Amino acid sequence: MADRPHLELSDYLPYLINRVGAAFVAGYEPRLAPHGLSIAMWRVLAALSTNGKQRQIDVAELTSIDVSTMSRLITRLVNLGLVTRTRSDTNNREVSVELSAKGRALVNRLIPRAREMEAMAVAGISAADLAITRETLRRMYANMAEKSADTEAHSPPPPLAKSG
């Protein structure tokens, strides 16, 4: 029998990362649902809580959410009264967003729950190991983002549409 490629799923890093992420989502979504929030909306609120008023495009970058998806999320958050959206002070084509007072109050209530989940997940892991894990994950993300940007920069342009 010829050798065939083998992948041990339980040791495959993307699987392990996804598995942890899925467990966080499953545990935290029920805490968000009563407020009409999704995980992606929570990420936006958390990013605004930490970083203050931001251009919408910068929130997309901070949260790793696609720009067109971000626009829809911001609209929902504005409709919920959790975020305000205004034209940028420096560029009329740019949109800035920030937490409303209602959004700030909600984030302040939800952060302790998020921290509880994180504490549960990291129980028994040393502070030194957690620091290494966080730095490793940041480096892995940077590697993937670099590769993605490099691939886009060196991709051939899309074919032109045929006319007539």
Image: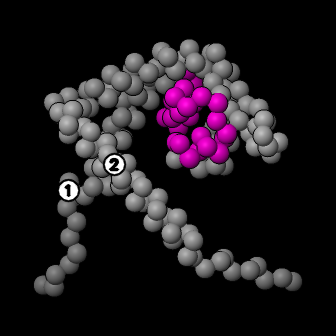
Tell me: 40 left or right of 17. Answer: right
Q: Alpha-carbon neighbours of circle 2 within 10 Å: few (<14), some, or many (≥20)? A: few
Q: Name the residue nearer the viewer: 31 or 88.
A: 88
x and y percent of residue 4 in the render?
20, 78
x and y percent of residue 97 in the render?
68, 32
- Badge 2 is on which residue? 137
Which of the 4 quarters of the picture holds residue 144? Answer: bottom left
Tell me: 147 left or right of 11. Answer: right
Number of disc labels:
2
Secondary structure beneath dot 2 equals helix
Amino acid type at mark 2? Leu
43 w.r.t. 147: above or below: above
Point out which mark residue 113 bears: none
Picture residue at 59% right of the left edge, 40% below the top: 59
Point out which mark residue 11 bears: 1
Report, in whole angstroms, how far the alpha carbon at label 1 lies from the one at label 2: 16 Å
Q: Nearer the viewer, mark 1 or mark 2?
A: 2
Picture residue at 56% right of the left edge, 69% below the top: 152
Picture residue at 57% right of the left edge, 76% below the top: 155
Which of the 4 quarters of the picture holds residue 102? Answer: top right
The magenta stretch spans which residues?
35-63
Check the image and name the residue furthest to the right.
164
20 w.r.t. 12: above or below: above
Q: Is residue 80 visible?
A: no
Amino acid type at mark 1? Asp
